[in-house]
Amino acid sequence: MKKLSVLLAAAMIAISAYAQPKANFSINKMENFTLHTYASFDAMADVSFIIEGENSLVILEPQAFKGKVEEFIAYTEKLGKPIERVLVSFHPAGLKVYREEHKVITKSMAEFLKSDAAKGMLGFFDKAFKGAMDTEIVAFDEQIDASTTFTVDGVKYTLEPTSVPGMPGVNIAIGENVYYQHFAPAKGFHASKNQIESKLAIDGALADATKAKKAGYTLLLGSHGFGKAGVDDLEFQIKYLKDMKKVAFKATSADEFIREMNLKYSDCKGEEDLKGIAEKLYNF
């Protein structure tokens, strides 16, 4: 639990660097649905998504902080369509407001929520944010397999387990061109230290990115920061992770790892993330 608290505290510090732009909604018109993205830039820089079909809405990864929940719900209500499903992948908080809506979670994440690690994480957030974050674990209406496909309002959702070790969230293909992962790729930025927590995580993130490229997705989504990325970002991420894997294999210390990565990516933003990754690779 002590290690978990240290990691979570570090995560809050790292994510706070994103918490400068103003919260905003953006819209992407896709083949048979409209994607609404809410970048909250709250203390965790959480991002939520609304998939608007012809007749109904699907919520992916709800908001959890006071003020942001209300803003997100108000926007949703303006769309004038019922919420058919609230789908949880990596973010099982902020669900108390959805009393009547059909809440869906994977069986693997449902099991994780019973663990001491999950309870410790949510408890830590509750104390750290002094009750401003809705951390209540609610009952879900449906638990589904982590590898499954279903259709809502004519939009196909294909779920598959992430290859990144840690929380058992899922990657989700939405329609033919949109792909959700916990972290979206970002050209010109170091990887998040909350994504790369071990050498196995480098391999996992690279595997997920390679799958996304092979599948030909053109819009990449993620639960933190700005929330959206394109093909150029994905190409950058693949090269970056391949280079990181080589450096991590050769480097014998955190300082050497940071030095070598900075030589290869001198223009990258997010030095604190790079330092955080090095700390986890060599000191935990």
Image (cartoon, rainbow, N blue to C red):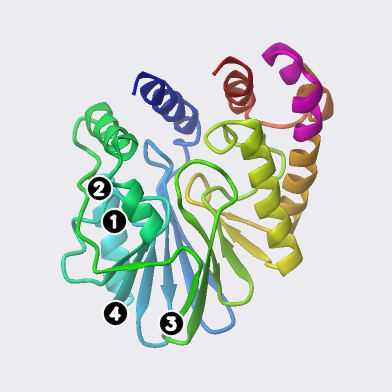
Disc 4 from disc 2: Cα separation: 21 Å
The part of the chain drawn in magenta is: 244-258
* Helix, strand or loop for disc 3: loop
Q: In the rendered image, which quarter is residue 77 located in?
A: bottom left
| Residue 67: assigned label | 2
Which label's residue is closer to the chain start, 4 or 1?
A: 1
Which of the numbered marks, if any, corresponds to residue 53? 3
Q: Is residue 72 above or below residue 216?
A: above
* Crowding near the residue tagged with mark 3, few <14, some 14–19, many ≥20 C-alpha atoms within 10 Å: some
Which residue is located at x 44 percent, y 25 percent? 7
Quadrant of image for the C terminus: top right
Q: Which residue is mark 4?
A: 80
For marks 1 and 3, the one nearer the N-term is 3
Name the kind of residue labelled 2 in the image: Gly
- Going 71% across and 68% down the picture, which residue do you hit? 215
Q: What residue is disc 1 on? A: 71
Badge 1 marks a residue whose secondary structure is: helix
Secondary structure of the residue carrying numbered label 2:
loop
Which image quadrant: the N terminus? top left
Quadrant of the rendered structure where residue 65 is? top left
Dots 3 and 4: beta carbons under 8 Å? Answer: no
Q: Are marks 1 and 3 in contact (CB under 8 Å)?
A: no
- How would you rate the neighbour count of disc 2 (Cα within 10 Å): few for under 14, some for 14-19, many for 20 or more? some
Q: Is residue 145 left or right of residue 140?
A: right
Q: How many marks?
A: 4
